[in-house]
Amino acid sequence: MSRRRVGRSLQLLGLILVPFGIASELNGAVGLRGSLLISGTGMVGFYLGRLIQGPS
């Protein structure tokens, strides 16, 4: 797999995790700490994907 594909996959995963963390907290499925952990993981995943992909 190319670096671009891996980077884009991580970015997509990050974009999916952030709203999922927020929605989970609003539904009461997880607490605030869990919501922030899920959203933070999504942000880190997006950032790593951006670094791996490199300049476009």
Image: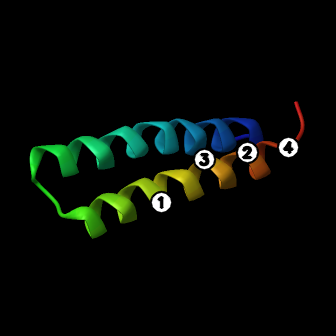
Give coordinates of residue 19: x percent, y percent. 36, 39
Marks 3 and 1 close (CB-CB < 8 Å)? no
Single out the residue that lies furthest toward the right.
55
Tell me how far mark 3 sits from mark 4, CA to CA.
13 Å
- Residue carrying label 3: 46
If the image is split into quadrants, where does the N terminus sit?
Answer: top right
Residue at 39% over, 45% down: 17
Residue at 59% over, 40% down: 11
Tell me how far mark 2 sits from mark 1, CA to CA.
15 Å
Secondary structure, mark 1, is helix
4 or 1: tag closer to the N-terminus:
1
Tell me how far mark 2 sits from mark 4, CA to CA.
6 Å
Residue 21's label in the rendered image is none
Q: In the image, 23: left or right of 45?
A: left
For marks 3 and 4, give the one nearer the viewer. Answer: 3
Tell me how far mark 3 sits from mark 1, CA to CA.
10 Å
- Residue carrying label 4: 54
Q: Amino acid at mark 4?
A: Gly
If the image is split into quadrants, where does the C terminus sit?
Answer: top right
Label 3 packing within 10 angstroms: few (<14), some (14-19), many (20+) = many
- Residue carrying label 1: 40
Q: In the image, 16: left or right of 20?
A: right
Residue 50's label in the rendered image is 2
Secondary structure, mark 4, is loop
Give coordinates of residue 43: x percent, y percent. 55, 52
Q: Amino acid at mark 2?
A: Arg
For marks 3 and 1, give the one nearer the viewer. Answer: 1
Secondary structure, mark 3, is helix
